[in-house]
Each structure stands twice: as structure tokens, then as C-alpha cells.
Image: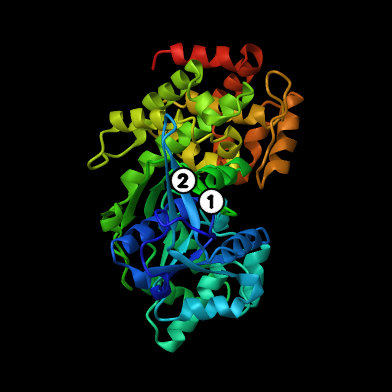
Amino acid sequence: MTTPAPLAPPYDRSAITTGIVHMGVGGFHRSHQAMYVDRLMRQGHARDWGICGVGLMPADTRMRDALAGQDHLYTLVLKHPGGKRESTVIGSIHNYLYAPDNPQAVLDLMCAPTTRIVSLTVTEGGYNIDDATGAFRTTSPGAVHDAAHPQDPTTSFGFIVEALRRRRDAGTKPFTVMSCDNLPGNGTIARTAVVAQAAMSDADLAQWIDQNVAFPNCMVDRITPATTPADIEEVRDLDGVVDAWPVVAEPFTQWVLEDSFPAGRPAFEQAGAQMVDDVVPYELMKLRLLNASHQGLAHWGRLLGIEYVHEAAADVDIVAWVRAYLEREARPTLRPVPGIDLDAYVETLFERFTNEAIADTLFRLAQDASSRMPKFVLGTVRDNLASGGPVQLGAAMVAAWALGEEGTDESGGRIEIDDPLGDELMALARRQHDGEVGAFLTHEGVFGELGGNSRFVAAFTEELTALRQQGARARMRALTAQSH
């Protein structure tokens, strides 16, 4: 693409070599990790930490083609409240490989000694982990194939395992596996997936990986909505850049990263990342406050026919309900967070949510709810059940989600469901609609033992019944008015 000089990367991209192989190049990776590396390159550093993206899914051909047509450059647009916008052309991704085109080329790059980090944004549901048990799903088709044909992998974890096997056999130091997905203990989960995939075909390799490969945990945060045709037109008209796939994001960004990189790493702290020994307090804060708030906005807002996040975040009843949930049920489960004022953090969340320039949708927040609700909300419910704390508001959020899975909002409009388990959950929602009130909770893959917890089931049953009788707005008001 033709890039105006003020926006173009001010460094020699021909000098970049690959140090990071990233699987799952989407909007978030390009607004976050790739942006941090670009910041370092603009400071004159990290030229040996260029990113080569890798796509594995059929839909990734679109990213391959978009980036290939513009020398892997793309525009990052930050939209502030009030209309201010900042545009930058990011140059840290200097190559992209679509794995089905040439799997061996991907493996060769992953085995190169210069590749010292393999990073991942494959979505919360992409780790092939059973949310109820925390175990890797060894019966999934991809895992079975990659165990039977380890030298011809098809999944991200199959590629990682085979590349690590080849590096071990060649005496090459292993790369670090860095998950950047929005998961509690994302590095630990990545370790579980990689080691379990390896164990399906080679127990000795699995043990070697577990003992020798680093899987740092990290917390990532930047609201990045899906790119729209209007975004593409705006970049062309306002920035003079023809970009097949720009990225729009909020100005806020945060990256808290466990400093465990035996093979080396870029100086992320010089680009604004926070390197720490223990990520857990930060990730729990983000997942149980920001991400849980997103789920609350989405599931209550969609019942009321609201489309955009900023509209839901300006609705006084939804906001009051979300604030009550955070104060009464979520915050008491958090550990102390060094350097963070939680009151100020919560206020910042609502400032971010009401940024109408982002035009984020409740549909996006509600996508993959079967994976997101267990990670963002049900963990809080479990902790409160164990401690004797309150669970009514958590149960009410699950009830709002369950009612939405019936597919109709309170005005008769359609609620679109986009979820890998959507068919199963909608079938349970139909049984629920027909009078089997607790049917939704019987999905063991989502709820696990919670479906048999008498206190939670009773709270859910009460909330779903009240929600049908009173409607979403009246029920939110009633719950918000209740004392702790």
C-alpha cells in the first residue's frame, strides 16, 4: 500500500529478521503485541524480533491475502472519546505464512535458532481445554490427527510440539511459548495443551517440554472491535491510505507479563509493558472486573435490544447492576494488586466502555459465551460458593445469558448466537423455554459441578423465573436495590 511519510514506519524494514512466530494474527494481536514490537523498532531496537504471522484456519486466507498485498503493513487507528483519532502504520509484522499452503515452511521457521518466541492469540476457546475439568481434550479430531501424524501437524499445538521435537533432536535451545489470549493462567493453559498433545505420541518428549520450555503467563488489555467497511473507507479518506484490513482500537492498552524468557525477549518494558514475577493478581483483576463487566453489558443489553457497548454502558440500570456485581461479588474474590487502585480502575473501565468512537458491539462481546462465561464469571461464582459469599448476581447474569440463548429479545427482535456450542446451548434453552427451568445448567462442558450445586441452581432458578416475570429492566433494578 502507498503510505504517507508521516504514517510510515521510520525504520528500515529490510533489516528485520524473524524472532517471533505468531499464530492467530487477528485484530487484537495487531493492535497489541505487534504494536509493542513496532514501538521498539521505532526506538531503534528489536530489528531481530520481527514477527512472522502464521494462519491455520481456512478463514486465515483472508488475512494472508490482505497482508501480502501491502507488504504486511497495516494501519492502526486509535479512537478517543470526542472524535480525536491517531493513525500509525505498523511494520513489525514482516511476513505471513498460511500453514496449509506449506506446513514444512512453517516448521522450518519455528525450528530456526533465530526464532526464540512462538506466541499465540487463538481465542479463549482455541486451547482445546475442557472448561469444567481443565484437561486437554485428547479426543478432538485435530489432537487425534496430530498425535497419529506428528510430522504433518494441523493444529497450533501440533506445530509447536513437532517444532520442539526437531529443536531438541538438533540440540537447538527451545523457544518460549507466549500465550497472549484472554485467559486466566494463559501460559499455564498453553503448557497443559502442548504437553498433553506431546504425550499423545511421545511421553519422553512431553516430559522434556515440561522441564525445558517456558510458558510465561500474561495479562493483555485493549478493546479492539472488528474492522468494518466504514473503517476501511475512513482510513482511505482521512489518512490517504488504501488498506485492505486496518485495525481500530481504543487508546488504552495494558500488558503485564511474567518475565520468564530463557531464550531471550525484546525489551517489552521499554515499550510500556510491565514485567512482573506474578501475573495472577493482575489477570484476575482484568478478567473478573473488565471482562465480567463486558459479559454483564452484553447479556443484559441484548435482552433489551441494545446493539452497541457504549449504549449499554450509558444505560443507568445496566450500569447500576454491573457496578453492584463488581462491588458485591467480584472484587471480594481478588487478591491485592500491586500498584493498582481498584476504585480508580473500575472508574476507568466505565470511561472506556462509553467511548462511542469505538462502536464496539454487544454481539462481539457475547460471541463464544460458552468459553468466556466460565473464565470471566463462573470462577467468581465458584470462589464465592466456597467462601460462603454471595452468588445471586452471578446467577442472574447466567440467567440473562440463558434467556438470550432462546433467541429473542424483549421486543421480539432476534438475538443472534455465535458460539461453537451454540446448537447445544440453544437446544437446552428450548427445553428451558418449555418449562425445564434448570436445563441450561446441565451442560457439563460449560458448568461442570455447578450444575449440581444446590445453592447455585436455586439462585439461577429464582433469577430466571423472576426475569421472565418482571423483565430485564425491572429485575436489574430489584437486584441493585437489594442490600449486600
Q: Secondary structure at mark 1?
A: loop
Residue 90 screen position, x and y as percent: 44, 57
Specify whether residue 448 is in view: no
Quadrant for residue 430, please give it: top right
Q: Nearer the viewer, residue 355 or 439?
A: 355
The residue nearer to you, when weighing 100 against 258, is 100
Tell me the crowding category of disc 1: few under 14, some 14 to 19, or many 20 or more residues within 10 angstroms, Cα based.
many
* Residue 477 locus on image (x, y percent): 50, 13
Q: Quadrant of residue 265?
A: bottom left
Report whether 418 appears left or right of 11. Answer: right
Between 43 and 412, the one lying in front of the other is: 43
Q: Is residue 470 visible?
A: yes
Q: Is residue 370 above or below residue 323?
A: below
Q: Quadrant of residue 16?
A: bottom left
Task: Check whether the beta carbons of the residues at disc 1 and disc 2 lie within 8 A of each other.
Answer: yes
Residue plotted at (66% across, 58% down): 59
In the rendered structure, which amino acid carries the disc numbered 1? Answer: Pro
Q: Which mark is residue 405?
A: none
Mark 2 closeness class: few <14, some 14–19, many ≥20 residues within 10 Å: many
Along the horizontal axis of the image, is 141 left or right of 159? right
Q: Is tag 1's residue or tag 2's residue first in the polypeptide sequence?
A: 2
Q: Determine the residue positioned at 68% across, 32% down.
A: 405
**Which quarter of the image is occupied by the N terminus?**
bottom right
Q: Is residue 234 above or below residue 83?
A: below
Q: Is residue 100 shown left or right of residue 266?
A: right
- Give the percent coordinates (x, y) of residue 31: 45, 51
The residue where tag 2 is placed is: 77
Q: Which residue is mark 1?
A: 246
